[in-house]
Amino acid sequence: MNTAQSPVRLQYWPASHSVDAPDEWPDSYEFETVDDAVTFAMTQRPADREIAWLRTEKGEVLALDQIRRIWSLRQL
């Protein structure tokens, strides 16, 4: 049994901002923790793109509103 967890992945929209557009999706960014990914998501904007989603190490998908909520809770 493999107990290694997958990295946390932060995904940005392609330039067209459409799921089914012919342009390619940019590579996702990998992080060791959700906190690291959320910090990057809220403080960086590579290629001026918008966040599509974050996939946790357990495979849970977090949408932008959930990412923002985690960030705001960290700031309290």
Image (tube, rainbow, N blue to C red):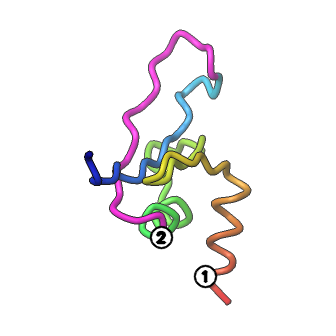
Q: x%, y% of residue 1? A: 26, 45
Image quadrant containing the C terminus = bottom right
Q: x%, y% of residue 39? A: 49, 69
Residue 35 got which mark? 2
Q: Amino acid at mark 1?
A: Arg
Q: Give the spatial CA distance, label 2 vs label 1.
A: 9 Å
> Circle 2: is it few (<14), some (14-19), or many (20+) Cα within 10 Å?
some
> Circle 1: is it few (<14), some (14-19), or many (20+) Cα within 10 Å?
few
* Viewer-nearest residue: 7 or 41: 7
Identity of the residue furthest to the bottom in this view: 76
Q: Which residue carries the number 1 mark?
A: 74
Q: Please tell me which residue is depicted at 35% across the width and 58% down the height of the picture.
A: 31
Who comes first in sequence, dot 2 or dot 1?
2
Q: x%, y% of residue 41? A: 52, 59
Q: Please tell me which residue is depicted at 41% across the width and 53% down the height of the picture.
A: 8
Q: Which residues are magenta?
A: 19-34
The reply to whether callout 2 and callout 1 are in contact (CB within 8 Å) is yes
Q: Amino acid at mark 2?
A: Asp
The kind of secondary structure element at disc 1 is helix
Q: Main secondary structure of the magenta part?
A: loop
